[in-house]
Image (cartoon, helix red, strand yellow):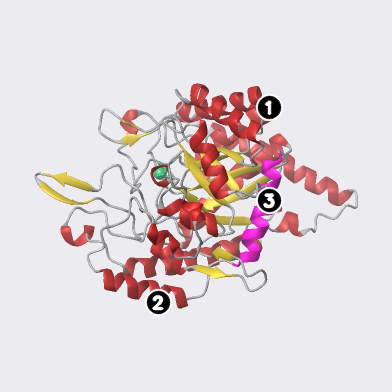
Amino acid sequence: MTSTPASASAWHPGSWKGYPALQQPNWPDKAELEQVGKALSTLPPLVFAGEARSLKEQLAKVARGEAFLLQAGDCAESFDGFNAVAIREKLRVILQMAVVLTYSSGVPTVKVGRIAGQFAKPRSKPTETIDGTELPSFLGHMVNDLPFSSENRRPDPDRLIQAYNQSASTLNLLRAFTKGGFADLHRVQAWNQEFVASSPEGQRYADLAAEIDRALRFMEAAGVSSNHPEIHEADFYTSHEALILEYEEALTRQDSLTDEWYDCSAHMIWIGERTRQLDGAHVEFFRGVKNPIGCKVGPTATPDDVLGLCEALNPEREDGRLTLIIRMGADKVADNLPPLLEAVRDSEHSVVWACDPMHGNTFAADSGYKTRHLDDVTTEVSEFFAAHRAAGTWPGGIHIELTGEDVTECLGGEDEVAQDDLSKRYETMCDPRLNGRQSVDLAFRVSELLRG
Ligand code: PEP
Ligand code: CO
């Protein structure tokens, strides 16, 4: 454990400023940043504290082994090509995965998007050099732009406002879709998007959707009305990596019902693998907000590191407060996860254990494209389940990077994406995402593991 835990003194929304904050942009104009922070702090919250509490209750069920978490969405949302169709397609594939997981396993699925705020990226290097020119790395559209020029790469605080506005309109549409009929289980067949439906995964999904349809018709014929909000509406929550602390601080508000502080930029926020230092600014900020929170845990984390995070972030040991998102890599998880599971179990801390089988399995294809293979993704999830079975703990969920579009960024799947296909539709601004078919395929593989 590191020497001075961030939890040593009084917390307030800006107390993180007294601690080292890694992965922050080098803002050229600090006064402008401060102005933007002030402007953001007067804008309405994006979510209501009561919604964050509802998610925490759902996650408490996951912590107790009564539900499963599906957290999924883009690696990085984009300001370009922002449109309703892209949001709808992402939601559609997440709903498809959730239905596969719930129907096949009999366990409720808690649905959380990496969406409506996922605009900031930690990077392995702060700068990038091309042909002798060194510029700041791309840090996500909340900070700068991707094309390699000094103008694009200059961190611009106005982007925080644009991120807020795009999050607000994304969230508005998600609420409309999930409460307004799009997510109605009677439409489960209609979620099968064309490019998915024509594949083996899509056929398997269509068979399952037909069974659900029959079950709903049977209920109605037997006089049991399927006219319940649970059937017509979906609970869908938002989340992102809370990396840029000025943005998160500006959206942190005191709940009028409880006087507690909530980061109202999303229902759930998480700390990335690169910023989880116990004496760092992110841990300090997170410990004081009451949202359900996550923390990524990579292959180098020791049992002491993880127990330190549990103490700092969930000292009251509340169910649903803390999700540990394990991202070790298919070849490391079997060795490195069991000591963590045992330490947390034996200390009687309460956590949701989720598996991010994406970030430890990235490699460069021969063509240079950054990619991941669905087989490695599946192997990591299956080793994660095996470790939990051995420790007697609950494999609580998965954390996935996906898109609703028919991209070719990850390899494998029943309708195999091969190395030569990567260039066909490689569109991500950051990490490679599963496409709709690969996502549905993964949901079936995970539901088999859940059934045991
Ligand atoms: C991410 O989730 O996109 C990410 C950067 O993950 P990690 O912090 O686990 O590397
Ligand atoms: Co990523």
**Which amino acid, by three-letter code, is at mark 2?**
Ala
- Give the residue at mark 2: 39
Indicate the position of residue 312 as horizontal and vertical percent values.
54, 48
Which is closer to the viewer, label 1 or label 3?
1
Confirm or reject: label 3 Cβ below 8 Å from ligand 1.
Answer: no
Q: CA distance from mark 1 to mark 2?
A: 49 Å
Q: CA distance from mark 1 to mark 3?
A: 21 Å
Q: CA distance from mark 2 to mark 3?
A: 33 Å
For residue 385, what is the image quadrant?
A: top right
**Which amino acid, by three-letter code, is at mark 3?**
Gln
Q: Which mark is residue 239?
A: none
Indicate the position of residue 217 as horizontal and vertical percent values.
80, 48
Secondary element type, mark 3: helix
Secondary element type, mark 2: helix
Q: In the figure, is residue 128 to the left or right of 267?
A: left
Quarter of the render that holds ligand 1: top left
- Give the residue at mark 3: 58
Range of residues picked out in magenta: 48-64
- Give the residue at mark 1: 392
